[in-house]
Amino acid sequence: MKIDTVDSYQGKENRIIIVATTRNNNQCIQGFLSSSERINVAISRAMDRLVIIGAARMWRERHQTSALGRVLNHIETHRDGNNFNLVQALAIEEGQK
């Protein structure tokens, strides 16, 4: 397992990439996630599986037109349980799929 930052991962790839957005604040401030270039690097490094962990509420409510907001919209529009899926944190805590 290798843990790295988005900035140091440019030009690299891996079979599975887990992106933790770490953004969930009352002010809905995007911080470094407002950079479409960083989002592009983060979500384009996976060869087989991309997992994004974050607070969908923040991107759905305040930042629909940001790069990550558009990614969330794409996932919600195309989710099929195989290629695109959303899993609520509560479902994970309760052991559901």
Image: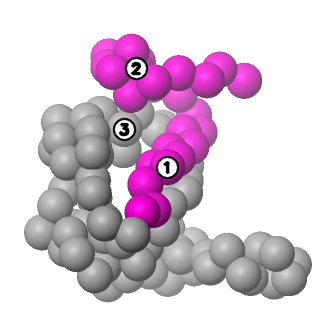
Start and end of the magenta stretch?
A: 1-25
**Figure check: 18 above or below 97:** above
Percent of width and height locating residue 16? 59, 39
Quadrant assignment for the N terminus: top right
Mark 1, residue position: 22
> Among all residues in the image, which is located at the extreme right?
95
Q: Is residue 12 left or right of residue 40?
A: right
Q: Nearer the N terminus, badge 3 or badge 2?
A: 2
Query: In terms of depth relative to the viewer, which is nearer, 7 or 51?
Result: 7
At x 37%, y 38%, the residue is 42
The residue sitting at 53% across, 76% down in the picture is 86
Residue at point 48%, 68% (across, down): 55
Q: Pointers 3 and 2 in contact (CB under 8 A)?
A: yes
Residue drawn 55% across the image and 57% down it:
53
The quadrant in which residue 93 appears is: bottom right
Q: Which mark is residue 42?
A: 3
Q: For mark 2, what is the residue?
A: 9
Q: Amino acid at mark 2?
A: Tyr
Residue 14 vs 72, above or below: the answer is above
